[in-house]
Image: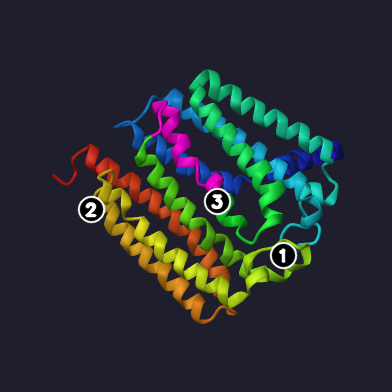
């Protein structure tokens, strides 16, 4: 019985290193990209293998992040119980696990989806696991902005999986996630600024101050809301999406404005959590609008 409990605990540790909640949001955005690409729905096999491949490659990058950040994780209350940080999983085990996940994901994408998807996922892996995790995160307070491009790729990865091509429609969704990333993570950085300072990670609140960061959150949110209308003006989305984007954007701006006025309040966590709700609902709105158009529900 003890061996079973230990084995189960280790399995849970390995799974947790893939950051399942982060990957779930990523896969939602990838699935939206897939469903938007070919009405009414793409082949089920492409959806299954595409999602599986993207998830495995993303999980691999997350595990590398755990390994590379083990020392930092030990100094932060939010991360000090992670498997690598505590030694429950050895670094070598983590690297082998990351290699297996990444290889399996790329093989699935290359042979069962298309080579372009495999190469784009590999580029995203390099961007997050190597360029962001091992360099940008420690080199500049603009780490989130510069590294955000790699985390913004899911809609494009999903689109490419079913079309074997790159489209401006998908790139507009990438732009939205790219602009969403700084206010999302800077709200968390405000809340955890003491921990980041202790870990010596140059997050914006520690290098430029709380007031400057709250101002940046507000301005990025404003630009995000404006950019979120782009799919409708480009013609890839319609009125349903535009109305939802306006309502969600208004709520996000309200949070950012309140945080700008009271940056030391408990609004940091609330803004961070709402940003996740915002992105999920915005992409759901894209999808609803798409199928309203496909099935002519408003005609």
From mark 2 to mark 1, how far is it between C-alphas? 42 Å
The reply to whether dot 2 and dot 1 touch (C-beta < 8 Å) is: no
User: Magenta span covers which residues?
Assistant: 149-166
Q: Which mark is residue 148?
A: 3
Query: Residue 75, how many percent across, how many down?
Result: 80, 61
| Secondary structure mostly taken by the magenta-highlighted segment of the chain | helix
> At 74% from the left edge and 57% from the top edge, which residue is drawn?
79
- Viewer-nearest of discs 2 and 1: 1
Q: Is residue 161 shown left or right of residue 195?
A: left
Query: Residue 262, how many percent across, how many down?
Result: 53, 81
Of marks 2 and 3, which one's residue comes earlier in the chain?
3
Between 51 and 178, the residue placed more toward the observer is 178
Of marks 2 and 1, which one's residue comes earlier in the chain?
1
Between 91 and 299, the residue placed more toward the observer is 91
Q: Residue 239 carries which label?
A: 2
Q: Does the magenta stretch include residue 47?
A: no
Q: Residue reaching furthest top?
A: 111
Using the image, determine if residue 76 lies above or below residue 290.
below
Between 46 and 124, the residue placed more toward the observer is 124
Residue 52 seen in render: no
From mark 2 to mark 3, how far is it between C-alphas? 28 Å
Kind of element beneath mark 2: helix
Residue 42 seen in render: yes
Task: Tell me how the rendering is colored.
Answer: rainbow
**Mark 1 highlights which residue?**
196
Give the quadrant of the N terminus: top right
10 Å crowding of disc 2: few (<14), some (14-19), many (20+): few
Q: Is residue 85 shown left or right of residue 214?
A: right
> At 18% from the left edge and 40% from the top edge, which residue is drawn?
296
């Amino acid at each position: 019985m003890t061996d079973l409990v230990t084995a189960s605990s280790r399995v849970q540790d390995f799974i947790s290193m893939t950051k399942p909640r982060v990957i779930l949001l990523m896969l939602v955005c990838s699935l939206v990209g897939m469903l938007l690409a070919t009405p009414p729905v793409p082949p089920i096999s492409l959806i299954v293998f595409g999602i599986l491949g993207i998830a495995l490659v993303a999980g691999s990058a997350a595990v590398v992040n755990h390994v590379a950040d083990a020392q930092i994780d030990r100094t932060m209350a939010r991360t000090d119980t992670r498997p690598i940080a505590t030694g429950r999983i050895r670094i070598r085990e983590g690297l082998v696990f990351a290699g297996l996940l990444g290889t399996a994901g790329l093989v699935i994408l290359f042979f069962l989806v298309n080579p372009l998807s495999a190469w784009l996922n590999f580029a995203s892996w390099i961007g997050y696991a190597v360029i962001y995790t091992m360099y940008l995160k420690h080199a500049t307070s603009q780490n989130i902005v510069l590294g955000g491009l790699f985390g913004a790729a899911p809609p494009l990865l999903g689109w490419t999986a079913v079309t074997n091509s790159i489209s401006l429609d998908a790139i507009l969704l990438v732009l939205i996630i790219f602009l969403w990333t700084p206010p999302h993570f800077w709200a968390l950085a405000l809340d955890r600024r003491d921990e980041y300072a202790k870990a010596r990670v140059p997050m914006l609140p520690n290098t430029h101050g709380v007031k400057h960061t709250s101002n940046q959150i507000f301005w990025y949110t404003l630009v995000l809301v404006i950019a979120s209308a782009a799919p409708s003006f480009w013609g890839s989305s319609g009125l349903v999406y535009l109305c939802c984007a306006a309502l969600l954007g208004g709520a996000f701006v309200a949070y950012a404005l309140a945080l700008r006025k009271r940056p030391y309040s408990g609004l940091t966590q609330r803004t961070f959590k709402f940003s996740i709700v915002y992105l999920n609902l915005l992409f759901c709105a894209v999808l609803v609008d798409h199928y309203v158009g496909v099935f002519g529900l408003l005609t």
